[in-house]
Image: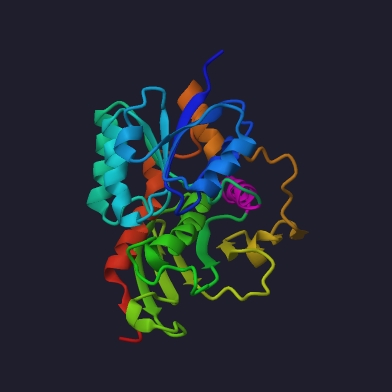
Amino acid sequence: MNKKLSVGLYGFWGHQIHKALYDNPEAEMTAVCGADDYWKNEFREHCKNEITYYDTLEEMLQDDRLDLISLCSHNRGDQEEDAIKCLKAGKHVYAEKPASYTEAGVDRLVATAKENGVEFHEMAGSVCVEPYWTARKIVRSGKIGEVVQVYVQKSYPLNMAYRPQDEETDGGLVRQVGIHAMRFIEHITGLEVKEVQVRQTHLGNVDPEKGLYTASSWMMTLNNGGVASACVNYLRPAGFPVYGNESVRIFGTEGMLEITDGGTKTHLYTNANGDEGAIDVTDSGCVDFLTLLIGHLLYGDPMPMSLEEELHPLRVVIRAFDNAECTTE
């Protein structure tokens, strides 16, 4: 039996994977860097194995036990360099989004991983949860025909006391929130966004001079000639039942499906069968992205998409950010 995958955690500014490692039969948290007393107490409560704590990433990378580093760097603008250090040290990398702020940086990450015989992956599991996984299967089966138009929405709370008021710390509206919307489009349909235009606004921000954009509208062309649009904002109201208010509507030549209200409601209509009701996620075989990655690294199990497909939404949001227009400037 193969040994467990040994994982090091660096930083906690993002979706760090610690909870997925509690009692995980195939992976364990071996080392941590950047944890305060709160995190150390939690790990003592939930982890049976001993954890080594380091003061710097460089010190942690000297730990020969580690196979994979999960990166949630405190400043997302530093994360590309952090990932390069890990890859050059011979560690696989699993990085919070956005993993880089430039396309040249994305190319650099992929090339460095290859040069050092390790793998780089972004935390790209937006559709590896239901009902998005079953929607992916339905669309790719051809049940709703050729995809002609897609509409997506991703909305987070503004939360001014918590939300970084700059575009550097966590990537900002287009890159940090918009990447989910781009994954919904590309990773469900299998189509690429070839052209993207974005208009965004500071309106509603109590301190617009600090630079945080609050809302954006996207227009896109897909590589099959279809079109897509996106609504991406920090305007999820306090009374909404889930943290992220997201929607997906996919219109094809033979039907359409929709996922609304943060993934809590679904519907499928086809020309062949009319109103088919809610999307049936029973026995879908959906597996979360981290579990898939662990199986891939330990046993060579296939990933649900190529690395190029995985990272293309990141390329789209980088292009969108670089060319976005602002309505309030």
Q: Residue at x 44, y 77 (%)?
A: 214
In this view, the residue farthest toward the front is 37
Note whether 195 is above or below 19 in the view shown: below
Image-based side of 168 in relation to 231, left or right: left
Write the residue at 57% across / 39% down.
43
In percent of width and height, residue 18 lies at: 54, 41
**Is residue 142 one of those drawn in magenta?**
yes
Q: Is residue 245 magenta?
A: no
Q: Position of residue 220 (x, y in %)?
A: 40, 67
Residue 323 appears in the rendering: yes
* Residue 120, image quadrant: top left
| SS assignment for the magenta stretch, majority | helix
Q: Residue at x 53, y 66 (%)?
A: 152
Examine the rendered structure and indicate whether residue 11 appears above or below residue 27: below
Q: Start and end of the magenta stretch? A: 131-143
Residue 27, relative to residue 229: is it above or below?
A: above
Instruction: Provide residue 149's location: percent of width, then percent of height.
Output: 51, 65
- Which of the 4 image quarters holds residue 48? top right
Q: Is residue 163 left or right of residue 134?
A: left
